[in-house]
Amino acid sequence: MTDVTVVGAGPTGLMLACELRLAGVGVVVLERLTEPTEQSRGRGLHTRSVELLDQRGLLDRFLAVSETFRVGGFFGGVHKPWPDGLDTAHPYGLATSQTDTVRLLTERALELGAEIRRGSDVVGLTRHEESPAPGVTVELADGTRLRSRYLVGCDGGRSTVRKLIGVGFPGQPATVETLLGDMEATEDRETIAAVVAEVRTTQLRFGVIPDVDGKAGVYRVVVPAEGVAEDRTAAPTLDEFKQRLRATAGTDFGVHTPRWLSRFGDATRQAERYRVGRVLLAGDAAHIHPPTGGQGLNLGVQDAFNLGWKLAAEVNGWAPEGLLDSYHTERHPVGAAVLDNTRAQMALLGTDPGPTALRELFAKLMDFEEVNRYVTGMITAVDVRYDVGHEVRYNGRHDVGHDQGEEGPALLGRRLRDVTLKRSGRLYALTHHARGLLLDRTGRLSVTGWTDRVDHVVDVSDELDVPAVLLRPDGHVAWAGDDQADLLDHLPRWFGPPTA
């Protein structure tokens, strides 16, 4: 029996496998496809995803195959300059093909010792909650059975795992549909660019992007479908693309030789629960929404980053009560907020006079730096904050705003940006092993009893106005202050009982 079975070898499942292996947890990843897909739907890694890659020492690998971009307020077709004052040391995103993301995360998962089994199609699932050895058994299409202590469904919007455990997936069905694919074209590039520029003055769900993923002569074509297909699992045809291009742009650009063709709608749905006993859901298995703002892949990877250390703590036997349940408590509201903002963006993308006027008004509002910063922080996820149920304590007193550290209350529940330390260099360089970290500028605190789970770094930074912060393995601030007794109250809440 292995520790954890992960169903799905997309970015979410692979990131989760990496996080679990960093904690020494045995992982088997089951993937239905025999080979990685060539479809590269998700091409943007937002700032928070860039940060978590850096936290695990993976950023250089991604920078080597990506271009950086700085688009602030990327919302509902409204693009504005990057805002000042965003709370990050990584003020950019990465244009990375999903095939590269999957390849790099696969390489890392294998380096860390994860087992990846391709051609493994899950068709059945049995939960053993009350047996002497509780766990989960999955049955594969070839009759193979695999038992593990926990199972995580990262198997997409049509998740087999979610259906097998009977979790509801309420929401709104698709009302519009968009065709998406990579193909070649006979029309010259300048003509294509001119036509696209003209059409996009009114139709923002249209685009023909050249040299996609570095492939010369290959275009990424995005065009509104005529309606919502009855069978949305069936890929569109090249003839359908041509017809919709002629209807939308007056020409089909001579498209030919498709690499892949697909469709997506504006449905928004979210799993009612992210955990049922020893089975959990992450990524598109837990939530689906339109790709507006490029948030889908990022949301799933960030689910995995939140879940990984908590599930590892449960497997390794030191998780405090309720820690694994906090995965749902923290991530379900984040997913719901993304569903809401994508609904709003789809409304802004409409071509009728009402949505057009609303988009023009929104664009003017985005010229205000505060609005731009708010929207950019929302889309990039750097403003995500969890409720850690804590006030800052200085010198034995609870304070909200104190001359020894006014930043403390604002930091609680947020991930800490990559600050520069006087002696230790960059903070994120200290977080590659997915452990907790006490950053202590007082030199008077101690994590004795938790040194197997929490690193203690005595250092200072000009970028922080707080005596000490306790970081969870995902980089979110769980405690701030300078009171040892208060720290000892909070360490068990996130890192379990001390060792003898």
Image (cartoon, rainbow, N blue to C red):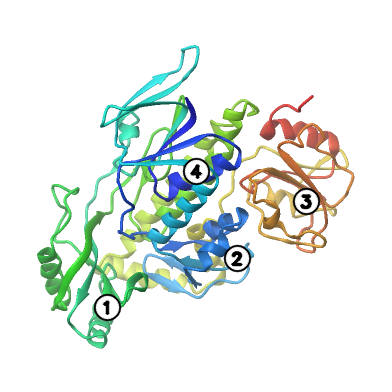
Which label number is shown at residue 126? none
Q: Looking at the image, do the residues carrying marks 2 and 1 touch, with CB atoms under 8 Å apart?
A: no
Task: Using residue 487 as the reference point, say whether residue 191 is left or right of it.
Answer: left
**Of callouts 1 and 3, which one flags the residue occurring earlier in the amino acid sequence?**
1
Residue at 27% of width from left, 74% of height from top?
Answer: 218
Judging by the rendered image, the residue that carries numbered circle 2 is 90
Between marks 1 and 4, how big is the CA–CA gap? 35 Å
Between marks 2 and 4, how big is the CA–CA gap? 23 Å
Judging by the rendered image, the residue that carries numbered circle 3 is 401
**Of callouts 2 and 4, which one flags the residue occurring earlier in the amino acid sequence?**
4
Question: Residue 274, image x and y in percent?
Answer: 44, 34
Q: Residues within 10 Å of mark 1 (few under 14, many from 20)?
A: some
Picture quadrant where residue 486 is located: top right
Q: Residues within 10 Å of mark 2 (few under 14, many from 20)?
A: some
Compared with 74, 210 (above or below) is below
Judging by the rendered image, the residue that carries numbered circle 1 is 217
**Of callouts 3 and 2, which one flags the residue occurring earlier in the amino acid sequence?**
2
Picture quadrant where residue 164 is located: top left
Disc 2 vs disc 4: which is toward the camera? 4
Residue at 57% of width from left, 54% of height from top?
Answer: 52
Residue at 15% of width from left, 52% of height from top?
Answer: 229
Q: Give the structural element (helix, strand or loop) at label 2.
A: loop
Q: Looking at the image, do the residues carrying marks 1 and 4 touch, with CB atoms under 8 Å apart?
A: no
Compared with 381, 336 (above or below) is above
